Amino acid sequence: MSLLRLVYLALAIWGAVHPMYWFTTWFGEHGWSLAGMVDAWHANAATSGLVWDLTIAAVALTVWIIAETWVRKNWLALIAIPATFGIGVSCGLPLYLFLRTRPVR
């Protein structure tokens, strides 16, 4: 495996673990309320702006994944979409790059 692929994989793992630490910490303090977390994401203009920034990035990444998967027929790369929306762009983007850069057979 190339160094570049290892970097993408490490970033995908970090992008999954680090945000989940903060989410589970928040849930531990405030209870397991998804509605409460969404309310917290919109606590002020700065957090709302960040939520929209990441949402737009996630949609753009999804469009790119679908378009490239259609052309390249790399169907495994589609797992980056649920990773993006279930964990975040910090996991979905490097995961997709890791899957995209695998050797073509």
Image (cartoon, grey):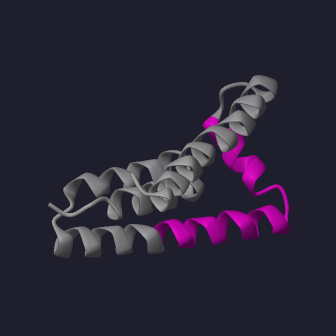
Does the magenta run of residues contain 38? yes
- Residue at 73% from the left image edge and 66% from the top image edge: 50
Closest to the observer: 2 or 44? 2
- Residue at 41% from the left image edge and 59% from the top image edge: 96
For residue 104, what is the image quadrant?
bottom left
- Residue at 83% from the left image edge and 67% from the top image edge: 46
For residue 69, what is the image quadrant?
bottom left
Image position of 98 (left or right of 72): right
- The overriding secondary structure of the stretch rendered in magenta is helix
Residue 21 in the image: above or below residue 61? above
Residue 53 in the image: above or below residue 38? below
For residue 17, what is the image quadrant?
top right
Residue farthest to the front, as pictured: 2
Q: Position of residue 58 (x, y in %)?
A: 51, 65
Image position of 45 (left or right of 48): right
Q: Position of residue 5 (x, y in %)?
A: 45, 57
Does the magenta run of residues contain 42? yes
* Picture quarter with the C terminus: bottom left
The boundaries of the magenta stretch are: 34-59
Q: Position of residue 63 (x, y in %)?
A: 36, 73
Residue 71 in the image: above or below residue 14? below
- Residue at 56% from the left image edge and 47% from the top image edge: 10
Residue 61 in the image: above or below residue 6? below
